[in-house]
Image: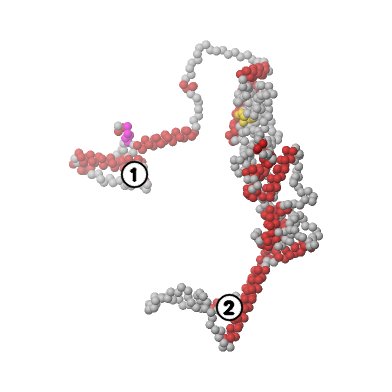
Amino acid sequence: MPRIMIKGGVWRNTEDEILKAAVMKYGKNQWSRIASLLHRKSAKQCKARWYEWLDPSIKKTEWSREEDEKLLHLAKIMPTQWRTIAPIIGRTAAQCIERYEYLLDQAQRKEDGEECVVDDPRKLKPGEIDPNPETKPARPDPKDMDEDELEMLSEARARLANTQGKKAKRKAREKQLEEARRLAALQKRRELRAAGIGSGNRKRVKGIDYNAEIPFEKRPASGFYDTSEENVEKLEPDFNKMRQQDLDGELRVEREERERRKDKQKLKQRKDKDMPMAMLQNLEPERKRSKLVLPQPQISDQELQQVVKLGRASEVAKEVATDSGVETTDALLADYSITPQVAVTPRTPAPFTDRIMQEAQNIMALTHVETPLKGGINTPLHDSDFSGALPKSTAIATPNTVIATPFRTQRGSGSVTPGGFATPMSAVVVAGKTPRVDGSQTTVLVRDKLNINVEENLNVGETPAMYKNYQKQLKHSLRESLATLPTPKNDYEIVVPEENELEPTDSTNESITVEDQADVDARVVAEKEKTRKQELEKRSQVVQRTLPRPTEVNTKILRPLSDKPNLTELQNAEEMIKHEMITMLLYDSTKDPVPGQSENKMDQLQTYFKSNPYEEISKEELK
């Protein structure tokens, strides 16, 4: 009975290397040609091996918590659509199925009460056949390989090393035969022509003979033309290209030699780079450095500044009390500089619930649901989120250790006596809030060693009787605290004056405040602007509207002084208007000089105004 060979089975290291080299040579489309190199594998198995394991883009690292949450969430939304889920997560479909089954097995073990085993519960037992060998690592080669494997390896090495394949060889052989046939026909025609035997009329070739005709030729009209204005350059022969080798062109032998040298150079470069060996040396793909993801800060800059300001204020008050020499004030001020440092930074609290295990338990519960015809309550499930294609990311809160102080504790209720103090039991800390024992949040009170600040949101009871009981307990604790005070050393008496004190003057009632510098600057700028506008109102409309002005003032429009006695009243009034107009123009030139005005002219204007002063008139005077 002949031996039956079934293709498939576990992949070996040799087969993986042959598959890599074949994909480099033939590409990712010719799987039948690639499978011809591997006697024990089919084309479909080679393709599955490449896309499920050997492809460099496949991620083979450990599954993260976020990927598990995405996988379970997408499996609920799109069940059994692993080809759609795989690219969203960034894994292959086989990896997604394997991880999904693993999580379900872990959830089943937890429900049954068994301990979670580190090993994979679906590990193959001895004698079992792996149904998906394409997704498993390659098995190492044995030292003594079979004859079939050695023959397959030598054949693959020979075929992969052959850079010039069968098709290229066939093309070269056909080209060589065509060239020999052409030379034989040419020799035959020459011999017949030498013997005086004609070869006959050739068959007319369809199309244009570019050697005998000019395509798309437009012949000029017949006639005589004047060529006197034409400058025709004489064609000088180029003797550089008159050699025999330039006229004959490149020979076939030289062209083949040049191609042969080019092939040798390519082969040498390929040996230098040696891509298959480079892939062997770098088995594990380089991992890109992931970004550092930190939780959101729980303490703002404003809170840090508040802590610094409180520390400085307490230090200043302590120094003032020490310098004054009064022991009573010094005793009332607490020394917060002795606050002990936290020895070890607290760890970020882990989430209370394992969402991955909850989702896996939900899926297990849904797969074991009985028929709804029986009635009864629905299968109890954990809370799920179907708001989007991906699960919501939960931010882990960092404990707020900056504002926390050992001198401040919150009053609790329950087992603790009302009015006493207890350490907060909750581990969740919110920025700006301190957790109470009952879980409520309250504003952080720092530097309150004397316990004089009123606590907010204090739950003392819902009934009036409980509130009265709390008040009694509070008064009792206050009396006990006052009883522990030392006896007074000095007696103080307060004498209330009989007559009413004089009312303080307005000057004492006014609070002493320092004006902000920005307000001072704004007020000064406003005053300057107001003064400038008042000065501008006294000027002419030309200056106010920034209209163009003449660079030279024509003073010759005035009549000479000798003609003044002979002028009528109307002419005298006209001369006065002209004189006032010239004075205004010169005054504008003095206060707001025109660009390019000389300094000598300014001196002349000053001399003019000594004899002819200019009077400024405001709007109030005109009224």
Q: Going by the image, does 14 lie left or right of 304?
A: right
The amino acid at mark 1 is: Leu
Compared to 282, does 109 lie above or below? above
Q: Please provide percent x and percent y for residue 478.
A: 65, 18
What element does badge 2 sit on?
helix
Query: CA separation, marks 2 and 1?
Result: 88 Å
Q: Quadrant of the N terminus?
A: bottom right
Residue at mark 1: 547
The amino acid at mark 2 is: Asp
Compared to 296, does 97 lie above or below? below
Q: Please provide percent x and percent y for residue 268.
A: 68, 65
Question: Is residue 570 within the magenta segment?
Answer: no
Q: Earlier in the sequence, mark 2 or mark 1?
A: 2
Disc 2 or disc 1, which is closer to the eye?
2
What element does badge 1 sit on?
loop
**Observer able to see residue 337:** no
For the point 48% across and 77% down, which residue is it?
213
Q: Which residues are magenta?
A: 616-620
Tell me the quarter of the picture where residue 221 sits.
bottom left
Tell me the quarter of the picture where residue 200 sits.
bottom right
Tell me the quarter of the picture where residue 190 sits.
bottom right
For the point 57% across and 86% down, which residue is it?
193
Q: Please provide percent x and percent y for residue 321.
A: 62, 24
Q: Going by the image, does 476 lie left or right of 207?
A: right
For the point 74% across and 59% down, which residue is it?
40
Residue at mark 2: 248
